[in-house]
Image: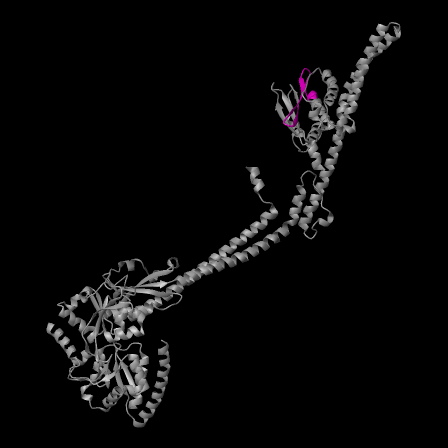
Amino acid sequence: MASVASSLTLPLSLRVPLIVAGLMVLMGLIASQLVMSSLVRSQERQLSDLARSDFVTLSTTIAPLIQRQDIWEMYDVLDRATQRTGGFSAISASLVDARGRVIVSTRPEQYPVGAHGVDLIASSVPVTELSYDNAQDVISLRDVIVYQGRPIAQFIIEFDASALAAERRQTWFWLIAGNAAATGLLALGGYFMIRRVLAPIGRLSRAMSVPGGPPQAFAPEMIPHRDRELANLYETYNSMTRAVEARSLTERRLAERERFVSLGRLSGTLAHEINNPLGGLLNSVDTIKRFPERSDVVLKSADILERGLKQMRDVARSTLSTYRNDLATLPLTTADFEDLYLLIRPEIERKAQELHWNIDVDDADCAALPAGPVRQVLLNLLLNASGASDAGTELGLRIGVEAQTLHLTVWDSGPGLPPHVRPRLLSDAPVDPGGGLGLRLVRDLVTSLKGDIRLSRTENGYSAIIVTLPLSPAEEKSDDA
Amino acid sequence: MTREGRFDRRAFLSSLTAGLATARYASARGQPPLRIGLTPVFLDNEWQVLESLRAHVVTVTGQHVEFVQRRTYQEVVALLLLGELDTAWLCGYPLMQRPDRLTALAIPVWRGRPLYQAYIIAAENRDAETLSDLKGDIHAYSDPDSNSGHLVTVAELLAQNERPEAFFDTSFFTFGHRNVVRAVAQRLAGSGSVDGYIYEALSTAEPDLVDRTRVIWRSDWHGFPPVVIATERKDSMATAALSRALFEIEATEPGREALRQLQLDGFAHPRPDSFDSIAALMARVADRG
């Protein structure tokens, strides 16, 4: 989830401008709301004033007519009053007496004289309670007509508020459209302005996260000298890149040396390996000298000599192969594993350890990988396993192919890789001073081959280091090209 | 409408000419204007007719004319009896209420006769065929002192052995025959009592209004609403001038125009029995108490 969240998080150079734009939109909304509420209050006052004015005017005219029960005159007055047109005009008017009977209505078919008028009252609101919320297309308002201090009728007027409702809708539309346009422009402007301000930060961020290579320093002309803070940041970054480069160079040199360190570690054993047969060989030479006429003795001694010399030749060839530079490009073969066996076996025997060698691949399987890095990886891991284990320990190498991946498993029955050295093999964390660089070299080589390293256990429960290398370097090369 | 518009301009010009003539005559002779009383029962929104009449009277009599409008017959009759008016266009019913003090000066001729009918009308889509179908209605009368707009209906209900005050659920007065038609057309009233002459005139002038109503019942023929004077002013100069103006109405263009607008043929001398039928209705109502 965390990785998903981090992948969804926008970069700073986009996030900040978007936040600014969002705040501007919010400001626009608040401004629109304020304007609309002000308009609503204004229209409420306007409606209330207009309605009250109509009620007062008509009530004054009609009250004596109610008193005289002059139905026609009441109707005529109301009918004329409801013939007006305008923004907020009466469209019908009715009078209801104290018993709830219609005195007269300008909608006589619906409310004839003397009919029940209670629903007319029920469907209206007092003019004093007029609010914009009930300002639909038609508003029904009522008031009490008082004549000579006595309430004589309920006066219900329906007003046509469609023009006001339309005005409100139109105002809403233009306000929202105007504010949206203004906010959009401001937000866009703010977005680009902030993006421009943050552009140097973005460049810095991109330079720091270039994939597949060390961070690159900025050229002096790219440093924004006008902004002191940013200039300091860029210079600090440049200092950091130089430090990283220097460290990387040092590590490369140390790794190069490591190849010879492993040879140094083997040199005594190799000398012993050469020295051992020498005594037997010299004895054979003496024998040949003493019994030159005895062909059977000469042949036997020559045979001994040949075997001894072949052994010495193989040891020398293996040692030389390990340090030949062209191995880096030659394809890996099963002969390389045999060379490794020759190199490591004497060291194992010297330490009275038991070596298990299980190679289950052929040349075609591993031809896609370069010989040099793979040999160096295995040599370092085997030497490390042997060095960290006591006499009598079993250790071994198992090689196989599975799903287009070469699996190299180096295992031992010893205590396994101590935790404090694991980061050298399993991470890119800086290496603690004092330790060797053999395991870090293994990691670098595996990484360069797009491979992976993990710790595991064999089926016997022995600790194991498993290196997996994809068997598709040809594609990688073409990609690199 | 085009015809009316054309006439309006002519009426205005006639009025202007007559007005100037009146001013000249009035200032020369120092005579007071002729005061003519009217009610909205007859005339409502008909200022063109008044202008034509004014122009005609001024032309014939040389006297300025002052129209005095009141809402009810009662008010106009009161002014006439007080001498505030020289004449008034009333109805036969108020005339017959004061036969001792009022005299008919002239009686309009409509469709060749000085007679008219009262109509009882209802909404055009109303399911009613006879007067009895209107029982329980909201009914619109014209004026309490109107023959066609009140008396005829009350008398007819009595003739049908109905109680006029109970026959209709509610009744009210509109004080104008046109208002009766409006009340029925707009469904304020279910039915109404209206002057047949006014109804027919409106069917030409405002067909949209009249088409929303239909006649349910027609009365007998009665004497047409007359032009009335106070009896004691029968021999006055004003009466003579008015009499001349009325009986010579076809002598001037404004007079002929006024007749066209009023859809009348002219004025006739009333006969002693012109309003006997109205008197009979009054007697029927009075007999009932």
Q: Can residue A364 be seen here?
A: yes
Vertical placement of A11 versus A272: above or below?
Answer: below
Vertical placement of A37 versus B65: above or below?
Answer: above
According to the image, what is the colour scheme of the structure?
A: one colour
In reply to whether residue A395 is colored magenta, the answer given is yes
Report the number of numbered marks.
Answer: 0
Q: Can residue B64 be seen here?
A: no
User: Which one is nearer the viewer's eye here, B136 or A224?
Assistant: B136
Q: Percent x, y for residue A119?
A: 28, 58
Vertical placement of B27 versus B104: above or below?
Answer: below
Q: Percent x, y for residue B213?
A: 27, 68
Q: In the picture provided, is A65 more to the left or to the right than A52? A: left
Q: Percent x, y for residue A441?
A: 71, 29
Q: Percent x, y for residue B265?
A: 26, 82
User: Which one is nearer the viewer's eye here, B244 or B283?
Assistant: B244
Start-end of magenta stretch? A385-408
User: Which one is nearer the viewer's eye here, A41 or B194?
Assistant: B194
Q: In the picture provided, is B261 more to the left or to the right than A465? A: left
Q: Quadrant of the N terminus of chain A?
A: top right
User: Which one is nearer the viewer's eye here, B123 or A453?
Assistant: B123
